[in-house]
Amino acid sequence: MEKNKKENITPSFAVEFYDDQSPRVTMGIKPITDIENTRYVWRHMDYKNPDARKMLVKNCGIPKDIAQAMCDESTRPRYFRNKNDGIVLIMRGINYNNESDPEDMVSLRVWVDHKKIITLSHNPLKAVKNMLEMVPTAEFHPNGPMQLFLSLAQNLADGINDAVIDLIEATADLEERVLNPDALSDFTLRDTISDMRRNIISIRRYTAPQKEIFMSLQTDKWEALSDDDRSGIREIYNDITKAVEDLDYCRDQMSVFHEELQSKVSISMTRIMYLISIVTVVFTPLTLLTGLLGINVRGIPYAENEYAFAFVCLILVLITIAVIAVMKRLKWL
């Protein structure tokens, strides 16, 4: 169990980008002493590591209040710009770790300024891992911290959209099960719908505010944002907006499925009660007659007649036919 916990903690590293040489990757939390000689730096750390907060303030030059906000245990997606020309973004990404549910989204805290980008998370994020793996490749050449951040944010948005596509496919499968005539005999269906609704709500809880983050970032007048940056921000905003709209669609579908099941249950119960009522109406006069003839007192007519039983049965049949005829005339059948 302890081994699994260690595996689910994000590794710390630093990537130094240069103009005239390949990026240099350093694993662990180590001070970067020649940051001025680099083009820019990307540092990633575990925000629960006690050394991370010290590194933010002493080596990275992050104000103490900003470092505190970035290392808080409980956060919600938000964005704000610091007076020192740096921006802070707190986002969430899909949890693709082993023995974890995707809807338990992983928090990612980001600082971006002209010279560096700092990312913090406790659990590993697939987007961060993908970006780190791309560093040695020739295709990976972001012009600066903001371009690197946008690539990372696009990876997060793609991960969210992949999870939402899975939910849409699961919703389509559920629709077939709900519309199946034997849906009421599928005893796991109601639990499946409830689980899906919880998953959708959990993902939407953190995805919807991220749409506001990129809308605010797109309209920010920060001079570090180029036209290309704003174009990338707009694409990410559109991707997240689509994910939120698809989540709303899935959520509404779950409500429709629940109402459909309730309607089927109600119709089934009404049909059962209707049949019981018909049986009751038909057998009530028969029960009354047989009850009168079955009382243990003297004076029962034709008690000694050998044809009495057949005669009573004939009367019961005639009464049944008469009751059914009346019910048909009243359009109860």
Image (cartoon, rainbow, N blue to C red):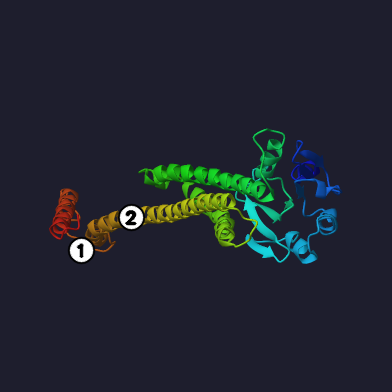
Mark 1 burial class by Cα count in 10 Å: few <14, some 14-19, many 20+:
few
User: 193 and 52: which one is in front?
Assistant: 52
Q: Nearer the viewer, residue 264 or 101?
A: 101
Question: Which residue is at a point 48% across and 43% down the rendered structure image?
Answer: 170
**Residue type pointed to by label 1:** Gly
Cα–Cα gap, marks 1 and 2: 49 Å
Quarter of the image that includes the N terminus: top right
Can residue 130 be seen from the camera position used here?
A: yes
The crowd level at tag 2 (other Cα within 10 Å; few <14, some 14-19, many 20+) is few
Residue 186 lies, in percent from the top left, at: 44, 44
Viewed as shown, does residue 29 lie left or right of 245?
right
Q: Position of residue 147 (x, y in %)?
A: 64, 47
Q: Is residue 273 left or right of residue 208?
A: left
What residue is pinned by disc 2?
267
Q: Describe the element under mark 2 as helix, strand or loop.
A: helix
Q: Is residue 98 visible?
A: no
Which mark is in front, 1 or 2? 2
Q: Position of residue 101 (x, y in %)?
A: 62, 47
Which of disc 2 and disc 1 is earlier in sequence?
2
Element at badge 1?
loop
From the viewer's perspective, is 182 left or right of 54? left
Q: Is residue 90 left or right of residue 169?
A: right
Foreground: 85 or 121? Answer: 85
Q: Residue at x 47, y 45 (%)?
A: 168
Residue position marked by numbered label 1 in the rendering: 299
| Quadrant in the picture for the C terminus | bottom left
User: In the image, what residue occupies the spot 28% across and 58% down?
Assistant: 277
Q: Amino acid at mark 2?
A: Ile
205 w.r.t. 34: above or below = below
Please tell me which residue lies in front, 249 or 184: 249
